[in-house]
Image (cartoon, rainbow, N blue to C red):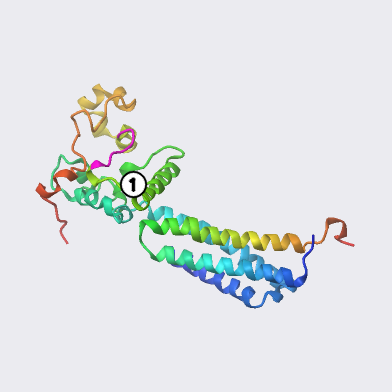
Amino acid sequence: MIEILICQIAISILLASIFLIRPSLTSATGWKIVAFIGLCVLPVLCIVGGMNTHVQRSETTRFCTSCHVMVPFGQSLSIDDANHIPAQHFQNHRVPSDMACYSCHADYTIYGPLSDKLRGLKRIYLQYITTPPAAVDIRIPGGFKNAQCLHCHAGARSFEENPVHSAIMDSLKSNQVSCLGSGCHDTAHDIANLDHRKFWKPVQ
Amino acid sequence: MKLSGIGIRRLLQVSSALAILGLLIEILSLVWFHPLSFVLFAFVAAGLIGLGILVYLVSLVLVAPPSGDTGR
């Protein structure tokens, strides 16, 4: 898709170059239409296509871990421990491995993707303008919401028929009992102990 | 308000130059895989392209004849 967008941008540049060099061409009706396409329609499509590409790219694991402070979180996805929630989701493809971060950290509400992007911009500000926090000090504002687990697990037979889950289902859905912080699934991104952890290496 | 032909041509050149610059920066942001590439696209490339479109639309408005003159 990015190749198509770059071709579109190249055509826009070509058309705009014509009117940069010979603006007098627009006195003819046919060239007026070409100018409208080259200086208005195609650039708008380039902005829309560029925004779409950047938003999709920002959802990839590679993009998240390209930020220096996120590198240990990316490494923690390879921890060899069945109780380590992010690692077992990543390694067993319970989330798409190329969108592992976004799958669990997206805000699945109507304006969620927009608020995710605004939060991302705030992090860029923290990274480049102020002093960024150390990786071990990074916490999700308001804590990890159960809705992000229930987005996939709610309705799944293995989840619903588990007696522990069914006994506290209402509390889980209302976020009164946290999936992560209630002693059940409490090992997530154990980056403070990365040095002491064993790592899984996928078979090539 | 009407501009002379030369003024409109100048606006078209400014519009083209802004669009070209913005589009080149957009290509750079697409090939550069970095958290700042989105910022470069959203705040620089899209801004320049948008400004180029705006200048082009302004040139269209300024060159359009008053409504009373149309079709006569």
Give the structural element (helix, strand or loop) at label 1: helix
Location of mark 1 (residue):
A102
Q: With respect to residue B9, does A164 lie above or below?
A: above
Q: Is residue A190 left or right of residue A24?
A: left
* Position of residue A29 measured from the top left corner of the image (x, y, whole percent): 74, 71
Q: Nearer the viewer, residue B40 or A9?
A: B40
Can the viewer see residue A195 in this picture? yes
Q: Chain of mark 1?
A: A
Q: With respect to residue A176, does A199 lie above or below?
A: below
* Position of residue B28 measured from the top left corner of the image (x, y, whole percent): 43, 66
Q: Nearer the viewer, residue B69 or A34?
A: B69
Residue located at (25% from left, 45% from top): A94
- Using a 10 Å C-alpha cutoff, classify the residue at mark 1 as few (fewer than 14 neighbours), some (14 to 19) or many (20 or more): some
Q: Which residues are magenta?
A: A137-143
Check the picture and name the quadrant holding the N terminus of chain A.
Answer: bottom left
Q: With respect to residue A77, does A21 lie above or below?
A: below
Check the picture and name the quadrant holding the C terminus of chain A.
Answer: bottom left
